[in-house]
Amino acid sequence: MSTGNEFIKRVVLRAEKTAFIFRLFLVLAGYVGITLWLNAIRNNSAIWFVWILIALQLFLFISIFVVCFMRTQQCGHRHAFWLFLVLAIASRVNDWELVLIPAMAVTMLVLSERNKKVSAQRQHLLPGEGDQPQKEMRTVGLSQNEVESVQEELRSGNQESAIQRIAEIQEQKRADLLVEGVDIRAMTPEIGSDIAWTDIVRHVFRVLAFDRNGTIIGPGDTVKASSLFKSYGYLLVESPIINQPVKLPIVHRDDFLLAASVFDEPQLLGAISKEKELLVTYVPKHKLPNGLIGRSHGLHYVITPRGTLDRYYEVGNDMHMRSPAPEKFFGAFVWDGEIRVQINPHPEI
């Protein structure tokens, strides 16, 4: 799995895009404002003041192209200097700036939105790439050198020290992102957006909360979502395979009805909050290339004694992280006909 890698990458990409939009808006607003002010007072103000405004206007004009050029560098286009130089010169011809600057700004916003490449200046925030046996440690955010240092601790038999080392590295990466203005702790990653659906197939999560997202259940189990373009609802879930709670979208009506059947039953919900836990796994009968379900529902639920999830992922030296086997306590998966929330009081893990 590459859940940790992908989430950190998305956060860095989002921070770079937001910073670019802020800078572009700032210099564009400043340039337009100074230009309008200069045109209004040019004929009636002292010449020295007019020249100060002209110098400031020129600085902001150049800054527009510099900001856009720097963003193309971040996106991996390293030979665009001459293009922006030509655009800057052409913009000073007659009133071409009225067309060229807006067109360039829109083009850069589109390019920035579609960019999937982290800039060279931010590569240190991302986990490194290594061979397959090191994949599990890379998912928690370790670079190649950091993986090797942790492996050295493990080879020496000091497992506690290795775990502490991993925690320190993750904390440092969070601090690095915080310097960039991104607080990961304040974010809740979402499956399908920050984490790929393909990364969670057959893995098991503990349900913490149920967000109906404005969806209403009517007579005859009719389900009406608040919008055609939104999920029916969300599950807030956690699991040992990730290091923080995440939002799991409910995109099929049957999956929403099953979740609601638990959270609408006070006695059952009370038991879950004390001595039992509601577990969910994502196993679609058919799935699209991006991992999203096809026609049938994809979420399966089971109620087990509290602590089942932790024991499941601890058994066999974390073997279920590498080879998920949710059938051990979900039983045979059902996609058609009568589907329901399973109850397994004695799961055999």
Image (spheres, rainbow, N blue to C red):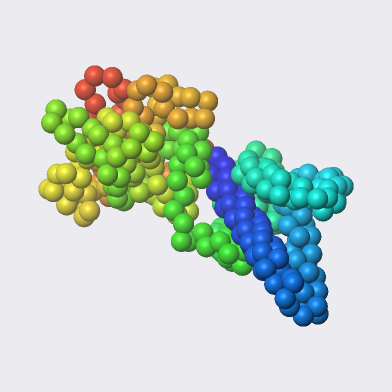
Q: Which residue is at 58% across, 45% downward?
A: 6
Q: Nearer the viewer, residue 162 or 156?
A: 162
Q: What is the quadrant of residue 79 in the picture?
A: top right
In this rendering, does residue 176 appear at all?
Answer: no
In this rendering, does residue 288 appear at all?
Answer: yes
Rendered view: 284 above or below 242: above
Residue 12, given in percent of the width and then of the height, sits at: 61, 53
Residue 100, given in percent of the width and then of the height, sits at: 74, 46
Q: What is the quadrant of residue 262 in the picture?
A: top left
Q: Quadrant of the C terminus?
A: top left
Residue 206, given in percent of the width and then of the height, sits at: 34, 46
Q: Nearer the viewer, residue 269 or 191?
A: 191
Q: Residue furthest front?
A: 43
Q: Nearer the viewer, residue 97 or 175?
A: 97
Q: Residue furthest top?
A: 337
Residue 179, given in percent of the width and then of the height, sits at: 61, 67
Q: Which residue is at 17% across, 30% downward?
A: 221
Q: Which residue is at 77% across, 74% downward?
A: 50
Q: Nearer the viewer, residue 176 or 71?
A: 71
Rendered view: 77 above or below 180: above
How many numbered marks are there? 0
